[in-house]
């Protein structure tokens, strides 16, 4: 019996062109394309949030400056009136009353001017701002519960209230240390054991 031999290049072309190989390649490319689209959209979403955050911070900074200036103007006005009253009381020999007015002037001058939003914001964000559903940079949605747990195998806790920093302890991967943005919409940070490994999540509810 004679066997027909085929050139190696013909065999190679047949293998490359086989439907099975082509189908697998298409599926892999489709999967990679889908993952790429998701990653791109998440990056764009994050950029949009950062732009909004920057605009918010700039607006707040401008508002704070105006508030500080107006409050300082009010303080100067009341100080001027009280100083005039103190002088009058001194001339009238009412020294005790004059001293009391002077003390009020001193209190006003030493009092730190803080915008009303400076009170209670950090505390509120720390206790309530993180509760809800977040989409992490790997595309997984995680719901943070108010008891320090999530709807998955993870727990979270506040580790630095002054910076709104949280630690997420995952069951199968290293922990994440992230900071809550000023508007309460973004969590951003790194792996707790690797400061070069960046992670983030955006609120979706």
Image: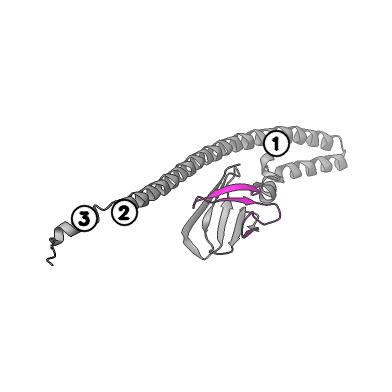
Q: CA distance from mark 2 to mark 3?
A: 11 Å
Q: Position of residue 119 (x, y in %)?
A: 70, 44
Q: Residue at x 19, y 58 (%)?
A: 12
Residue range in magenta is 130-155
Work out whether residue 180 can be spotted: yes
Q: Position of residue 136 (x, y in %)?
A: 53, 51
Q: Residue at x 60, y 59 (%)?
A: 167
Lower position in the chain sequence, tag 1 or tag 2? 2
Query: Which is more foreground, mark 1 or mark 3?
Result: 3
Q: Which element carries disc 1, helix, strand or loop?
A: helix
- Left or right of residue 77, residue 163 in this image: left
Q: Residue at x 38, y 50 (%)?
A: 32
Q: Position of residue 28 (x, y in %)?
A: 36, 52
Quadrant including the C terminus: top right
Residue 143 is a magenta residue: yes
Mark on residue 75? 1
Say which of 138 and 195 sits in front. 138
Residue identified by numbered label 3: 14
Mark on residue 20? 2
Work out whether residue 115 can be spotted: no
- Left or right of residue 83, residue 203 in this image: left
Quarter occupied by residue 149:
bottom right
Lower position in the chain sequence, tag 1 or tag 3? 3
């Amino acid at each position: 019996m004679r066997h027909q031999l085929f050139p190696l290049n013909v065999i190679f072309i047949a293998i490359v062109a086989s439907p099975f190989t082509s189908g697998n390649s298409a599926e892999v490319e489709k999967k990679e394309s889908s993952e790429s689209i998701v990653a791109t959209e998440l990056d764009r979403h994050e950029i949009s949030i950062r732009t909004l955050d920057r605009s918010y911070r700039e607006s707040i900074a401008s508002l704070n400056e105006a508030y500080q200036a107006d409050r300082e103007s009010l303080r100067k006005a009341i100080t001027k009136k009280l100083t005039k009253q103190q002088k009058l009381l001194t001339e009238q020999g009412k020294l005790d009353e004059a001293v009391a007015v002077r003390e009020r002037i001193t209190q006003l001058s030493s009092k730190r001017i803080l915008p009303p939003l400076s009170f209670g914001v950090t505390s509120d964000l720390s206790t309530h701002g993180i509760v809800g559903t977040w989409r992490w940079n790997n595309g997984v949605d995680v719901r943070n519960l108010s008891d320090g747990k999530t709807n998955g195998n993870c727990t979270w806790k506040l580790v630095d209230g002054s910076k709104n920093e949280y630690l997420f302890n995952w069951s199968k991967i290293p922990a994440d240390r992230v900071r809550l943005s000023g508007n309460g919409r973004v969590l951003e940070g790194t792996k707790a054991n690797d400061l070069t490994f960046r992670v983030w999540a955006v609120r979706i509810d």
